[in-house]
Image (cartoon, rainbow, N blue to C red):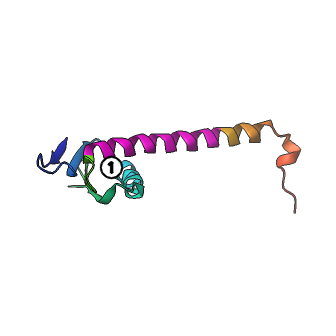
Amino acid sequence: MEHGSYKNPSASTFSITEEDHTLANSLRLVLNKDPRVMSCGYSIPHPSEARVNISVQTTGDPAIEVLKDSCQNLIYMCEHVRKTFDDAVTNCKSKPKDAMDVSP
């Protein structure tokens, strides 16, 4: 759900349900790296409520589009981390057991 101004689409607050600090902090990091973002932050209204509010203020682009782009970038980052991890596990499993032993 978006809580924003129709007169100023470059500043909005988005409520995301069923999420917590894990997504909010990651998304905040990705948003802050975007050169179109002037400021962003998040809050959790109450600890017992599974909802985060993410505020985004841009340099002029619609905040909703910048948020969508940042979500897509976060997905790409997670996919890259997953692939790197899976490749490392496969590489480790393919080595002979003696090569994995570390002796002082």
Q: Amino acid at mark 1?
A: Asp
70 is higher (above) or lower (below) than 43: above
User: Residue 50, how many percent across, how many down?
Assistant: 26, 46
Q: Which residue is mark 1?
A: 20
Name the residue furthest front: 60
Decide if residue 50 is in sight here.
Answer: no
Name the residue furthest bottom: 104
Say which quadrant the C terminus sits in.
bottom right
Residue at figure coordinates x 15%, y 51% from the top left: 8
Q: Start and end of the magenta stretch?
A: 64-86
Q: Is residue 79 magenta?
A: yes
Decide if residue 40 is in sight here.
Answer: yes
| Label 1 neighbour load within 10 Å: few <14, some 14-19, many 20+ | some
User: Residue 1, how many percent across, how many down?
Assistant: 19, 41
Q: Which one is in front, 37 or 81?
A: 37
8 is higher (above) or lower (below) than 94: below
Q: Which one is in front, 11 or 77?
A: 11
Residue at figure coordinates x 27%, y 49% from the top left: 61
Of helix, strand and loop, which mostly describes the magenta segment?
A: helix
Q: Secondary structure at mark 1?
A: loop
User: Residue 51, how many percent across, how many down?
Assistant: 25, 47
13 is higher (above) or lower (below) than 84: below
Residue at figure coordinates x 76%, y 38% from the top left: 93
Q: Is residue 30 left or right of residue 48?
A: right
Q: Is residue 104 left or right of residue 52?
A: right
Residue at figure coordinates x 75%, y 42% from the top left: 92
Instruction: State the image quarter where residue 40 is shown.
Output: bottom left
